[in-house]
Image (cartoon, rainbow, N blue to C red):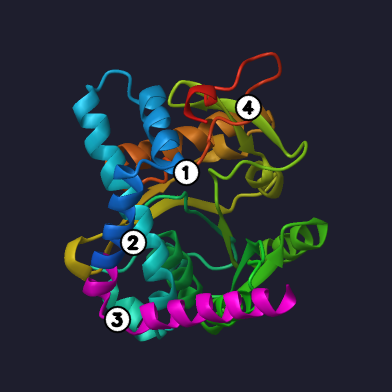
């Protein structure tokens, strides 16, 4: 059994290294093909995607939701295949891929001493956004290890190479983020990832209750740090990425965590509406439902 796992891990790592050598345009074409197959099969991801679009865009017709759903899975396929390509890219290559530098870079240059929280949802290329963010100064971000040791080692080395400190998703990781905040570093946050345990609260997202992290308002309590919500839109044919950014105000640091979570979701929703076909709709964002309410995904299981 151990030998089989070792062989599997080596095959996966070999496949990812092959993807890293393809021209980005070819890499994206392959990823799009994989995503299209996942839509037409249809897979569980396709069912969850369809259900999320029904919940979030009831005013759109079925043809629109099918088109966005297919493009979303194609975008997720590209996110998968482009990751190893990005992991081996140099900071100079990453900078060239940005159509223009992110605005938060000028913000950081203008005002030192204050921490900068970058909140990048599962929209566009969050891997690109995270890797390039670390090129603009010391950065800390939570990290959940990959199950495949070779992939995990590759990812850790790639993210560390651009200056990121990876913090485990536990109490020790929280201390790492707090220390980075106190130094005025960059802190990377995935604002639309469902938190574990009692570290979140339900707040509206596209009009439906979604369990939302309260890590951000906890870290911001009593402070005046910068908070920017952003995503890197993936451009066609490997032509690079375009940043979309929203600078948040004190609403995301509200002492009432329910109001802060609602503000966080409002900013994420505003970004998603700019490019819904590049959002990860295959994620069960509305699970778990509030106590006493049925799961909205029963029909998609």
> Which of marks 3 and 2 precedes in the sequence?
3
**Cα distance in 3D space between marks 4 and 3:** 42 Å
Label 2 belongs to which residue?
A: 78
> Which of marks 1 and 3 precedes in the sequence?
3
The relative height of residue 265 versus residue 6 in the rendered view (above or below) is above
Observer-side mark, 2 or 4, equals 2
Residue 138 is situated, as x and y percent measured from the top left of the image, at 58, 75
Label 4 belongs to which residue?
A: 202
Residue closest to the far top? 292
Q: Is residue 144 left or right of residue 206?
A: right
Label 4 element class? strand
> Which of marks 4 and 2 precedes in the sequence?
2
- Tell me if residue 9 is in the magenta stretch: yes
The relative height of residue 3 versus residue 46 in the rendered view (above or below) is below
Q: Are marks 2 and 3 in contact (CB under 8 Å)?
A: no
* Neighbour tally class for label 3: few under 14, some 14-19, many 20 plus, Cα within 10 Å: some
- Tell me if residue 20 is in the magenta stretch: yes
Q: Are marks 1 and 2 in contact (CB under 8 Å)?
A: no
Mark linked to residue 22: 3
* Neighbour tally class for label 4: few under 14, some 14-19, many 20 plus, Cα within 10 Å: many
Label 1 element class? loop
Label 1 belongs to which residue?
A: 248
Magenta: main secondary structure: helix
What residue span does the magenta drawing correspond to? 1-28
Observer-side mark, 3 or 1, equals 3
In the rendered image, which quarter is residue 234 located in? bottom left
Q: Is residue 38 left or right of residue 213?
A: left
């Amino acid at each position: 059994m151990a030998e089989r796992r070792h062989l599997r891990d080596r095959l996966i790592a070999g496949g990812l290294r092959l993807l890293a050598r393809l021209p980005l345009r070819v890499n994206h074409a392959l990823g799009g093909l994989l995503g299209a197959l996942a839509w037409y099969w249809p897979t569980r991801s396709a069912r969850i995607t369809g259900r999320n679009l029904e919940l979030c865009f009831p005013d759109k017709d079925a043809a629109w939701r099918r088109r966005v759903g297919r493009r979303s899975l194609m975008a997720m396929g590209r996110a998968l295949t482009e990751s190893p390509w990005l992991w081996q890219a140099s900071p100079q290559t990453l900078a060239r891929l940005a159509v223009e530098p992110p605005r938060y870079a000028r913000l950081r240059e203008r005002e030192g001493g204050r921490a900068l929280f970058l909140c990048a949802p599962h929209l566009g290329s969050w891997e690109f956004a995270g890797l390039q963010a670390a090129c603009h100064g010391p950065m800390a971000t939570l990290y959940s290890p990959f199950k495949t040791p070779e992939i995990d080692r590759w990812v850790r080395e790639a993210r560390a190479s651009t200056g990121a400190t990876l913090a485990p998703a536990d109490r020790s990781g929280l201390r790492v983020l707090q220390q980075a905040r106190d130094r005025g570093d960059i802190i990377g946050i995935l604002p639309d990832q469902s938190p574990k345990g009692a570290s979140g609260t339900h707040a509206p997202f596209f009009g439906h209750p979604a369990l939302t992290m309260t890590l951000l308002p906890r870290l911001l309590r009593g402070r005046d740090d910068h908070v920017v919500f952003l995503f890197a839109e993936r451009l066609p044919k490997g032509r690079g990425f375009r940043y979309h950014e929203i600078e948040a105000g004190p609403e995301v640091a509200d002492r009432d965590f329910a109001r802060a979570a609602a503000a966080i979701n409002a900013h994420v929703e505003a970004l998603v509406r700019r490019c819904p076909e590049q959002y990860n709709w295959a994620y069960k964002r509305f699970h778990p439902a509030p106590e006493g309410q049925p799961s909205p995904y029963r029909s998609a299981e």
